[in-house]
Image (cartoon, helix red, strand yellow):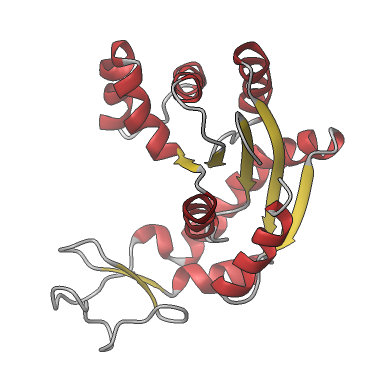
Amino acid sequence: MTGKKIVILLGPPGVGKGTQGRRLAEERDWRYLATGDVLREGVKVRPALAEAVKSYMDRGELVPDAFVNELVEALLESSDQPVVLDGYPRTLSQAEALDQMTEKIGWQVHSAILMKVNEEELVDRLTARRVCPQCGEIYNLKTQPPQQDDICDRCGQVLIVRDDDKAEVIRRRLSVYQQLTEPVVEYYRRQGRLTEVDASGSPQEVYAKLWQVTINQ
């Protein structure tokens, strides 16, 4: 894949979009943009939106679609690198807006890749996550454990379980994901741009599948 083309990573929380998307972008010399990156980097390109975006983030509220769409457009216009999008579009209206903006500015949504893992495995993965309250280092007791149980390798603090990583919260997040994102999945499926990848297995095994899917893109 060369030039002004986009690969979208879709999938529920905990499926590994961030880990795999960053690695894919780095090894293919693409640009990786998660939602947080869009907000942080986008306001540098469109400083007129900085104050409004910051006000929503400071209140812990979702930034309205209109602002997010404009920031995505600004970042695409400022780059010629192929882009991996993670976390956007998260709604059908955002997917439709992305198609409109890419047509306007000469970009193309090349494909959407749905990373799939069954719900029980996702809950198992996320409840195994531990975070250092001091330095922010993230571990997973199953796939990336600390050298010493419940102790951060970097600073020696006792690791914690975030509220977001408790089973009941995770199941609510997955339910919200299904409601918001399933229409996005079907949107790209109907267009023939959706590819499904089994994201169970080790990070290396999943990456090999993604690499194969994108090798000719």
Q: Is residue 110 left or right of residue 152?
A: right
| Residue for point 57% across, 61% down | 15
Residue 106 placed where, x, y %?
Answer: 63, 17
Estimate the x, y position of residue 131 in percent, counting from the top left: 29, 67
The quarter in which the N terminus is drawn is top right
Identified at 65% across, 60% down, the residue is 211
* Residue at x 63% of width, y 32% of height: 5
One can see residue 116 in this view: no
On screen, residue 184 above or below 72: below
- Residue 57 sits above or below residue 53 on the image: below
**Residue 152, quarter of picture:** bottom left
Query: In the rendered image, which quarter contains the C terminus?
Result: top right
Instruction: Name the residue rendered at 46%, 79% in the picture.
Output: 143
Count of marks overlaid on the render:
0
In percent of width and height, residue 54 lies at 27, 25
Rendered view: 169 above or below 35:
below
Q: Is residue 158 visible?
A: yes
Q: Position of residue 203 (x, y in %)?
A: 55, 71
Q: Please identify the residue farthest to the front as the structure is shown.
A: 2
Q: In the orientation shown, which residue stands out farthest toward the bottom? A: 148
Determine whether 99 is above or below 62 in the image.
above
Instruction: Please indicate whether residue 93 sits to the left or right of residue 36 in the image.
Output: right
In front of the other: 179 or 159:
159
